[in-house]
Amino acid sequence: MIGLEFICKVYRIEYKDLALSIGVSPPSIQDWLKGRRKIPKARIVQLRQIFKSVPEEYFQKELTKSEELHVQQIYFTETDEFEEIEIPFIDDDGVERWHKERYSQNSGIINSLIDKRKNESLIERIRALIDNDEFTENNNHKMVDKYISILEKNKKEEINFLRMVFYYFKNKHEWGFDPFFAASEKEIKMYEEFKELLLNYKIIEPDEPAD
């Protein structure tokens, strides 16, 4: 199914009502859904006015699983309702007080969809790498297989080495951990030596001086 069909299903909009909203006949909607005709640019603009947060490219393409989850996430975010609840707390003087917080009724399902979407996006990226192996002599498949094998073995030394590689090849702040926090002298020495190796061969750039 193309994106528009899935979007209507999630938003619980019937095709006849959608056709009426944008000024086309119901058979025109069916032609778009069956792929007999492309959705005209002017109609895409109208659809964007109805489904305000849905990316434009979603309407006419066959959605991936992660994109379907994205549409659901958008729907539950747009239709979310909030209520204020009072939460008790103890102040610095030991007195019980109350403060108000806004509570999202859809927060649980939205967070679940976000997590599922991350997982599906990762699986799709891995699948794309493997599917393109005809151009890489099967190297992508071998590398992914090796990486998964290391994780499955769960050997601390091998996993720590992978973490070290990712630490230097990714933005350090994105990686989300400080390898030098509570590290042993041996681990710190390994990181420093590996960094020097990467710098010597100009694989990474030197750190920018601190302000």
Image (tube, helix red, strand yellow):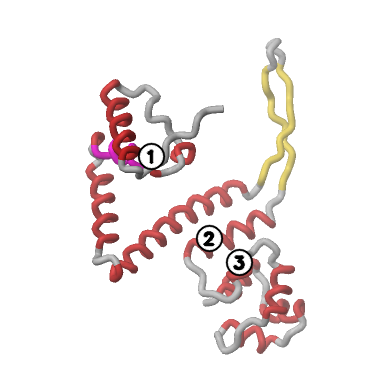
Residue type indicated by callout 1: Tyr
Q: Residue at x 66, y 89 (%)?
A: 27
Mark 3 → mark 2, Cα distance in angstroms: 10 Å
Segment colored magenta: 158-166
Residue type indicated by callout 2: Leu
Residue 10's disc is: 3
Position of 9 compared to 130: left or right?
Answer: right
Number of numbered discs visible in the structure rendering: 3
The answer to the question of whether label 2 and label 1 lie on touching residues, with beta carbons closer than 8 A, is no
Point out the tag, 2 or 1, that comes first from the N-terminus.
Answer: 2
Q: Which residue is mark 1?
A: 168
Q: Quadrant of residue 28?
A: bottom right
Q: Nearer the viewer, residue 145 or 164?
A: 164
Q: Which residue is mark 2?
A: 69
Label 2 crowd bin: few (<14), some (14–19), many (20+), radius 10 Å: many
Label 3 crowd bin: few (<14), some (14–19), many (20+), radius 10 Å: some
User: In what element is the residue under mark 3?
Assistant: helix
Point out the tag, 1 or 3, that comes first from the N-terminus.
Answer: 3
